[in-house]
Amino acid sequence: MNGMHDLGGMHGFGPVDPEPNEPVFHHEWERRAFALNLATGFLGRWNIDMGRYAREHMPPAAYLATTYYEHWLYGLERLLVETGLVAATELETMRRLGPGPVKALGPADVPKALRNRRAARMEDRLAAPRFKAGDRVRTKNLHPTGHTRLPRYARDKVGVIDRDHGVFIFADAHAATGEKVPQHCYAVRFEGRELWGPDAGPRDAVFVDCFEPYLEPA
Amino acid sequence: MSDHHHGHEHEHDDRPGAHGAPLTDVQLRVRALESLLVDKGLVDPKALDTLIDTYETKVGPRNGARVVAKAWVDPAFKQRLLADSTAAIAELGYIGRQGEDMVVLENTPKVHNVVVCTLCSCYPWPVLGLPPVWYKSGPYRARTVIDPRGVLREFGVDLPDDVEVRVWDSTAELRYLVLPERPRGTGGMSEEQLAELVTRDAMIGVAQVKAPAR
């Protein structure tokens, strides 16, 4: 979706503002919001792409006026209700009507859950690649209302396949239905001037990881 | 984005009663949500503590620094690291969530790589920990793809015009780690000493590694 999260290329944000010796978390509530997201994610009621899509629904003005873990909190509340883990009235009153349908992740389960080594990658034999390194491609002019990993700045642009990363779960479909559709994912090199016009640096390039359905031969 | 409004704040302990300050709306909301989820048996607070402790104290950029230092002193490891980054990083035990599929990008005198996630905050957790606020902020996400040299200059990296800048937007499930150039004058240093020189920012690609002052 063309949400506020898709920030690449916008003007007006001002300088980057790094904080010396920044702590991992700035507030206790950030720690809890972070961990609540992970712990409920491990319950298996939604996948990571659904999680991202939920955050992307935050209205633009609210997205810009809130901090990072507030985005996570927004997405989490939305998912809890959508998946039926929490009733809408429970979220409204913050009082439970009954027990949840699944059992909590215990502390002993955490290390194993975090060590999982296979997330989005699928077996290469599941899909034949349409493109190879060096091929010229054009990204499609797509504006889906669903989740997509093709940023607006890289739509309808010509680039060159830098490498084929292999086969991955297609995030767009995974967010919509949970179905694991195998698709090749390629690093596509776009020259700065193709993306941004003549003011871009002549020796600047942006690499975008593109799922095969975003691409057609150029 | 207001993410960066937190810049330069110090730790604010907003646990109940700390400093006697009133709780903000978001503090209250997170506390209420945690209580609700615990009441419903969906969340175990001890699991939350374990998750927080893992990312606050156990995983962080020192892991990535060890990968970089090893690549600097061990040419065979460097070769493996660039050919199959995930497997080579796993040799050091750094595996798991948000690092399942790694790509290492080598900086050279002619090519400078820098990593961003314009759509959210994708970042290689097992080797760098959780991302800093600036990495997740509007300015960095908006500008790095359209004005990479301007952003790099703000970080103190002023690249000559003949150096190619490659920006990697982590839009899919690959997670990127920059292998910075080894600074001159570090020939006599051990792997452990070299690891001490490697900064998080250098592994994102917004800094270069400096030799220690003599």
Image (spheres, rainbow, N blue to C red):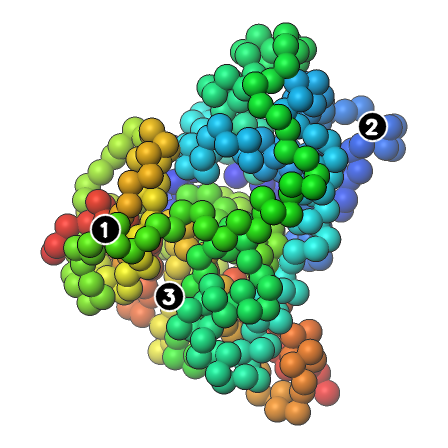
Of the numbered discs 3 and 2, the one sitting upstream in the chain is 2
Q: Secondary structure at mark 1?
A: loop
Judge by depth and name the residue closer to the eye, A67 or A127: A127
- Quarter containing the C terminus of chain A: bottom left
Give the residue type at disc 2: Pro
According to the image, label 1 marks what residue? Answer: A127
Q: Which residue is mark 3?
A: B166
Q: CA distance from mark 3 to mark 2?
A: 46 Å
> Where B94 falls versus A56 (above or below)?
below
- Where residue A191 appears, x then y in whole percent? 26, 62
Give the chain of mark 2. B
Residue B16, numbered label: 2
Asked if labels 2 and 1 share a chain, the reply is no
Give the distance between the C-alpha atoms of the residues marked 3 and 1, in whole angstroms.
Answer: 29 Å
Type of the residue with mark 1: Ala
Q: Which of pointers 2 and 1 indicates the residue nearer the eye?
A: 1
**Side (left or right) of A183 relative to B108:** left
Whether labels 3 and 1 share one chain? no
Residue B139's label in the rendered image is none
Instruction: For mark 1, name the chain.
Output: A
**Residue B10's spot in the image, x, y percent?**
76, 46
